[in-house]
Amino acid sequence: MTDSTRLLGISNAIVDVLAHIDDDFLDKIGAPSGSMTLIDENRAHEIYAMMGPATEMSGGSVANTVAGFANLGGSAAYIGRVKADQLGEIFVHDMRSLGVDIRLQPAADGAPTARCHVLISPDGQRTMQTYLGACTELGEGDVTETTVGKPGVILLEGYVWDIAEGPALAASAIKIAKANGSSVALSLSDSFCVERHRDAFHAAVRNGVDIVVADEDEVNALLQTESFEETTRKLADYDNLFAMTRSEKGSVIMHKGETVIQPATPVETIVDTTGAGDAYTAGFLYGLTSDKSLQECAKLGTYCATNVIQQVGGRIESGLLEGYTG
Amino acid sequence: MTDSTRLLGISNAIVDVLAHIDDDFLDKIGAPSGSMTLIDENRAHEIYAMMGPATEMSGGSVANTVAGFANLGGSAAYIGRVKADQLGEIFVHDMRSLGVDIRLQPAADGAPTARCHVLISPDGQRTMQTYLGACTELGEGDVTETTVGKPGVILLEGYVWDIAEGPALAASAIKIAKANGSSVALSLSDSFCVERHRDAFHAAVRNGVDIVVADEDEVNALLQTESFEETTRKLADYDNLFAMTRSEKGSVIMHKGETVIQPATPVETIVDTTGAGDAYTAGFLYGLTSDKSLQECAKLGTYCATNVIQQVGGRIESGLLEGYTG
């Protein structure tokens, strides 16, 4: 029997530092356009010193989803590690202000709160340089019966496997979920992350993860397929629920032989695609934990993603469902 | 003989914390819509805890002007007090990344870096709750021949008079300017600030300040007039240069009998009026320190203000003059 929390996220708690760059910048730092690179603290200072004036806002993929879920009106909780510094205060404030139950206190010592330098090219493409800082200190001991409780769904992100005790704490979360009847969802984060941890993700998907949320590239990377058509054929062998986003091609949900195809909603102008997948996941899981049909879940996910790409920033706004007509 | 720095700003160094509020919020905190209230640290924590998710970016009126001036390509320097904390690092980074010469090191101890809670009402109106923190520790000893140098223009803001040693350090700045041939400009900040310090501003304007930048309400408050027409009649008695903005009515420059009237540039959509006056001042002073005519200065100011109200945030973007055709 689960408790009143519908969604618990476990992920890297990150403050985004967003700045516009010119076309030469990525060459100078040697980063492929659109990539996410993990960097150390010295490199973070170097990159930041090279960047122009920036804007700071709370980010992190699964954290965005949890914030969005709370904004939709769902009870949500969060496990992630920040330091008790000003950026940590910002991260925790932004979550708490939405009613998210923060299960870990900011750490008094250790590495500073994580930041992701989001470099926005003239064409709108975003390249990320992430200093994980305090996130790397999230440990197996932080994921316990007490901190996890009995939520409806536990949502993990692939990036958790990038931190030292990530695989162990993910295993703990899955074990606690199985004991209490919580579902486990895994967001595959990005296709490079899938390349880094493919075997571990396969093991998790075959043994404990109920729901996989991913974009087309990520799920193709997981299954090592050349096309989405090949992916959908292979998924016939899986019992997991796969919720897969395909940008302007919409989304596809597959679960035990049922396939739901949801077209994208055309928009006049895309302001910023940041967080589109995270917002989709928020809407999808909000539907799922409200016992909606898969089609209805896909509609809710699409509604949230459509909203977030028409604004700056990766988190959906409050009161969004007031305009939802299904 | 002045040095190569064209503009030196002396002001409160502030990081803005921007969030949308609903209509009840201002009633709850007892703040008039559109006002700027100075608050202490405890109140800052209270207000922040009541606010929804926020976005952080460097702000401060004269700091915005200095950043804008540097963005236009003018050599600029800045004196303001931040602590060596994460928000202080953000403020200094955003200035340095534009090439602004930061004349004071962040303080190792003392109050944290200032923040202004910018509360955005559904109608777009902005109400500010400002915790001055480290700004209040800016002292007379920070404004010396060494830190000031010999810039073309020294720009002070009215808000400096809100801090303990503000009047004394402003007097020092004016004295150093007079000794070295620098001009002194004073931004009147807001009409409530003028009410608080009218006598001091009058004394400064009569004795040392060469240029007054203000919007219509502020200059009316300074001269205690009922209308802008009455203000312009009274200004015939002043030798100072007055650069006055009037929103959609454009701007008026008056100097020793010369009056320049510059209409506003019509825009289809105003995204955010934050920093319109600060951007105007940046353009105006950029023109003035390039020995342009007053009409040309007013055009440059209008060009910058028109740009900044069509984007989110109070600072103008780099490369702006590339599109300027006069």
Image (cartoon, coloured by chain):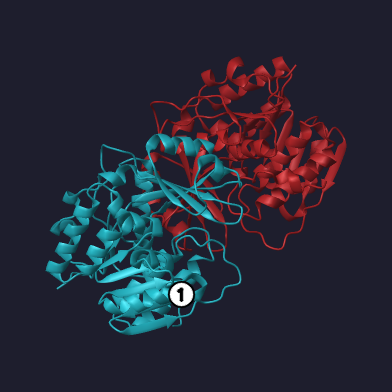
Chain colours: A cyan, B red
* x, y percent for residue B281: 70, 40
Q: For mark 1, what is the residue? A: A303
Looking at the image, residue A127 sits to the left or right of residue A168; the answer is right
* x, y percent for residue B145: 61, 15
> Along the line of sight, which residue is nearer the eye, B319 or B113?
B319
- The residue type indicated by label 1 comes to Tyr
> Along the line of sight, which residue is nearer the eye, B25 or B16?
B16
Look at the picture and state if B3 lies above or below A195: above
Q: How many marks?
A: 1
**Label 1 CA crowd tier, 10 Å (few <14, some 14–19, many 20+):** many
Query: Residue reaching furthest left?
Result: A179
Disc 1 chain ID:
A
The N terminus of chain B - image quarter: top right
Looking at the image, residue A321 sits to the left or right of residue A124; the answer is left
* x, y percent for residue B49: 36, 52
What residue do we see at 30% from left, 41% from top?
Answer: A84
What residue do we see at 52% from left, 72% from top?
Answer: A248
Look at the picture and state if B257 lies above or below B265: above
Quadrant position of residue A160: bottom left
Quadrant position of residue B27: bottom left
Is residue B144 in view? no
Looking at the image, residue A201 sits to the left or right of residue B10; the answer is left
* x, y percent for residue B283: 73, 40
Is residue A172 in view? yes
Label 1 element class: helix
